[in-house]
Image (cartoon, rainbow, N blue to C red):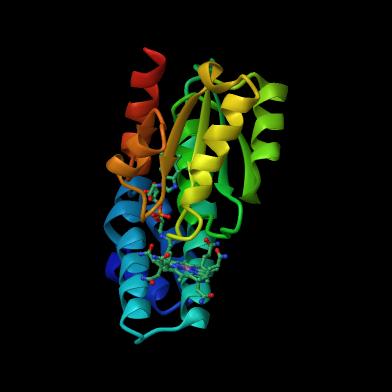
Amino acid sequence: MANLDLLYEAILKGKQNDAVAITEAAIAENILPKTLIEDYMIKAMEEVGDRFEKQEAFVPELLMAGRAMKSSLNLLQPILKQSGASATIGKVIIGTVKGDLHDIGKNLVASMFEGCGFEVIDVGIDVDSGKFIDAIKEHNADILGLSALLTTTMPYMKTVIDDLEKAGLRDKVKVMVGGAPVSENFAMEIGADGFSDSANSAITKAKELLGI
Ligand code: B12
């Protein structure tokens, strides 16, 4: 039986090989990805963040924990996707806004969307409004998902929404925002249509926005 506390420890300490080995063992034992992600992996990232805030951990530790988390998540992503319906229920453009390189949460939300039957076009990190707008036009998207993890990059979400209006696209796409510092209030203030603080509730919100 895989000891999942060791998965928490491996991510917290940035031990990529250990994180991968425990995740593989957990997959072999059919432990649900949701359990691994929500009860152990995200909790470890939160703890690294808290330690960073208290200056008990520094950028290299964030980086190593991030790498370990991504490697485990890579193993889980095919399983998350497999659970998806065969028909596409909506198209989602998702990316992390300009100036921001954090992509673990964005990737998780993207996988969850795929797993729930959405077609996802991930435009990556450090994305400016022009790139979001081009992708919306090219793919005729239903939802735009914006991710930001820094208080300094959150305001750029409003820039993207303003630029969507200027491009005449605001009423063609529902805008959802998320990321650790983003709140429901902030989402309303900047004129977004939806906010979510987890990958699961993001899907519920998206379906609600599209009326499906
Ligand atoms: C890992 C990490 C890094 C890694 C990122 C690796 C990667 N590939 O992503 C690296 C080392 C690169 C990094 C760099 C920096 N980081 Co950093 N980082 C983190 C850390 C520890 C974890 C983030 C994470 O992955 N969490 C796990 C995921 C699953 O959670 P999440 O992203 O919040 O996503 C969930 C929800 O928010 C939501 N969601 C997310 N996106 C979206 C999008 C949509 C559309 C929806 C609906 C929902 C949604 O669903 C997700 C799934 O549940 C956080 C601490 C924290 N507690 O957040 C700090 C943190 C975000 N970083 C911080 C800082 C300061 C930095 C640096 C400035 C450090 C420096 N001095 O260089 C740089 C900035 C680089 C840049 N320009 O972006 C601060 C931000 C403080 C602030 N108030 O702005 C934090 C909060 C740490 C802290 N406590 O001080 N970081």
Q: As displayed, is residue 54 above or below residue 93?
A: below
Q: As displayed, is residue 11 above or below residue 182?
A: below
At which x and y percent is residue 158? 49, 41
Q: Nearer the viewer, residue 28 or 187?
A: 187
Q: As displayed, is residue 204 above or below residue 157?
A: above
At which x and y percent is residue 118? 51, 25
Q: Which of the 4 quarters of the picture holds residue 3? A: bottom left
Query: What residue is rendered at 33% in x and 20% in y?
Result: 208
Q: Nearer the viewer, residue 22 or 14?
A: 14
Query: What residue is rendered at 33% in x and 35% in y?
Result: 188
Query: What residue is rendered at 49% in x and 16% in y?
Result: 89
Query: What residue is rendered at 42% in x and 59% in y?
Result: 151
**Residue 95 falls left or right of residue 34:** right
At which x and y percent is residue 38? 30, 53
- Report the residue that reaches farthest toward the bottom: 56
**Residue 128 falls left or right of residue 42:** right
Instruction: Look at the image and tell me in which quarter the C terminus lies.
Output: top left
At which x and y percent is residue 69? 47, 63
Visible residue check, residue 17: no
Image quadrant, ligand 1: bottom left
